[in-house]
Amino acid sequence: MLEVKNLRAGYGAINVLWDVSLRAEEGALTTIVGPNGAGKSTLLKAVMGLVPATQGELRLRGEPLAGSRTWDMADKGVVLVPEGRLVFRDMSVEENLIMGAFPKARRASMPNNLERAYAMFPRLKERRKQLAGSLSGGEAQMVAMARGMMAEPRILLIDEPSLGLAPVIVQEIFQILSRLKREGVTIVLVEQNTHMALSVADRVYMMRSGKVVLDKPASEVDVKALHDLYFALDGQSVG
């Protein structure tokens, strides 16, 4: 569904991604793990057009994404849930969710999608009139994910959803990810909690220093070997 081939991208004169290639199959959950600074978030931003690609290809269902504007990606069915639980702090929970239905093609189905979001995240329904800026970290993450689902994405890019959250909230977030996968949503998940990521993933990529050093089905990944790669010398890889 999503294909990245020999991608290079970065910030001005600083290149971050070096010939990165990966595939996210339709209906599957693809997870990208790796240490801080590996380029994982930059990769998601490059897919969304937030970071310019200087080389390589980005294709969605066979169609090139080169030149696509970030604000048009939701119309293509691609939605990013960014790192850091970014919410509109001075707006209510419900207003935040409604913002997720901004694409014109999604506005008619907004009421139904709102009820679906509340069914998936019951706590948000209880807090629907509360300002998003007053929520706990876990609740804010739920808002960010539910807001992404309001656009009816065919592919959902999620960046570090468990970062800084209590274990019980992390379990809840990953239960939602499993549910979305069962419902047929294609998910690309960037995550540092390798145990949790492997528990829901179909395929695993690991990045180090802007390069892919591991590409395997999740069922074939040895957790110890994966963790060893975090501290491997640059250039070591596992096919």
Image (cartoon, helix red, strand yellow):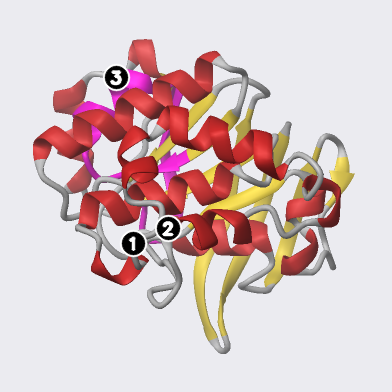
Q: Which residue is mark 1?
A: 130
Residue kind at label 1, given as amino acid type: Gln
Disc 1 and disc 2: Cα gap in Å? 6 Å
Magenta includes 27?
A: no
Residue 29 in percent (x, y) is at: 50, 26
Q: Quadrant of the N terminus?
A: top right
Direction from residue 21 to residue 166 in the image, left or right: left
Residue kind at label 2, given as amino acid type: Val
Residue 11 in percent (x, y) is at: 54, 82
The numbered disc on residue 93 is 2
Q: How many marks?
A: 3
Query: Which picture quadrant has residue 93?
Result: bottom left
Neighbourhood count class around disc 1 (C-alpha, 10 Å): few under 14, some 14–19, many 20 upward:
some
Please name which of the two marks, 3 or 1, marks the residue nearer to the observer: 1
Residue interval drawn in magenta? 189-216
Along the viewing direction, whichever of 204 and 8 lies nearer the viewer: 204
**Which comes sooner in the sequence, label 1 or label 2?**
2
Along the viewing direction, whichever of 204 and 213 lies nearer the viewer: 204
Neighbourhood count class around disc 2 (C-alpha, 10 Å): few under 14, some 14–19, many 20 upward:
many
With respect to residue 38, does 10 lie above or below? below
**Which comes sooner in the sequence, label 3 or label 1?**
1
Along the viewing direction, whichever of 64 and 164 lies nearer the viewer: 164
Residue drawn at x 39%, y 42% is: 125
